[in-house]
């Protein structure tokens, strides 16, 4: 299985901060890497698909980058609505696998 | 408007069976692939299964031989038949569809989930 390792597992940040979350795959995933946001009690929501493409309706302060086995989600100018848990997903090979999640909390 | 509505969750004893349904609307159901994703209480997300429009299916190893994904394109319903349930299958189960106009990838849109609790 392609293991997805996210770091950090949690972080504390303030409104207006720049936040970076990293996802490392144990095997290359080409461009089949997406990012999701989940708030407590809610279904996840896709933010970014194919490494760096913003899903329609997602604010431009979210961005994704990376290649091969290392990928990054960046949130610039963190807003109150961004405090949530974030997951990466690889869907290049079965089983599709998520990272373990990064909880972004208010400092 | 795209809608995915999961039903069928509940409390079931270990070894029992349950069938989840996901009623879809607002898109061309028969032409898209759909998945089930689960989340144990307080834990992360786990992909469970996918079914493509031609009927091809894939499963995570932990449910192979116990769970069966299927679809009824005439009713726009996705199913997950879960047999030989274990305590570790306790989770919120989400139905999700490919991104379609929202961009490629398996989980462009999600339902709200249905809770399955396996306990004696």
Image: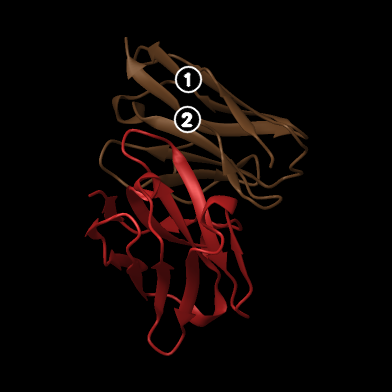
The answer to whether residue B59 is seen in the rendering is yes
Seen at 48% across and 64% down, the residue is B67
Q: Which chain gets the red colouring?
A: B
Chain coloured brown here: A
Looking at the picture, does residue A13 appear above or below residue A51? above
Q: Nearer the viewer, residue B32 or A17?
A: B32
Element under disc 1: loop
Query: Which residue is denoted by mark 1 in the rendering?
Result: A9
C-beta proximity under 8 Å, tags 1 and 2: yes
Q: Toward which corner of the image does residue B15 lie, by quadrant? A: bottom left
Q: Residue at x 49, y 63 (%)?
A: B66
- Spatial CA span between label 1 and label 2: 6 Å
Kindly identify which residue carries mark 2: A101
List x then y, in percent, for residue A57: 43, 48
**Extreme-top residue of the structure:** A107
Q: Nearer the viewer, residue B111 or B90?
A: B90
Spot occupied by residue B22 in the image (x, y as percentages of width and height): 35, 70
Number of residue marks:
2
Secondary structure at numbered mark 2: loop
Chain containing mark 2? A
| Residue shown at the point (43%, 58%) measured from the top left | B109
Residue at left 74%, top 42%?
A29
Look at the picture and state if A66 lies above or below B118: above
> Can you give x and y, in whole percent of width and height, for residue B113 in the image?
31, 55
> Do tags 1 and 2 sit on the same chain?
yes
Q: Quadrant of the N terminus of chain A?
A: top right
């Amino acid at each position: 299985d392609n293991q997805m390792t996210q770091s950090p597992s949690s972080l504390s940040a303030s409104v207006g901060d720049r936040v970076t979350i990293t996802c490392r795959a144990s095997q290359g995933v080409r461009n089949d890497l997406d990012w999701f946001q989940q708030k407590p009690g809610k279904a996840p929501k896709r933010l970014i698909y194919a490494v760096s493409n913003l899903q329609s309706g997602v604010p431009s302060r979210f961005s994704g980058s990376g290649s091969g086995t290392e990928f990054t989600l960046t949130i610039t100018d963190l807003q109150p609505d961004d405090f949530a848990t974030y997951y990466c997903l690889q869907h290049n090979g079965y089983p599709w696998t998520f990272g373990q999640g990064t909880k972004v909390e208010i400092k | 408007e795209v809608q995915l509505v999961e039903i069928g969750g509940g409390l079931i004893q270990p070894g029992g069976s349950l069938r989840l349904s996901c009623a879809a609307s607002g898109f061309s159901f028969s032409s898209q692939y759909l998945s089930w994703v689960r989340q144990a209480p307080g834990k992360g997300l786990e992909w469970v299964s996918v079914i493509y429009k031609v009927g091809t299916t894939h499963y995570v190893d932990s449910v192979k031989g116990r769970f069966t994904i299927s679809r009824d394109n005439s009713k726009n319903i996705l199913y997950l038949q879960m047999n030989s349930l274990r305590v570790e299958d306790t989770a919120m189960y989400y139905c999700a569809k490919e991104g379609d106009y929202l961009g490629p990838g398996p989980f462009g849109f999600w339902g709200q989930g249905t809770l399955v609790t396996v306990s004696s």
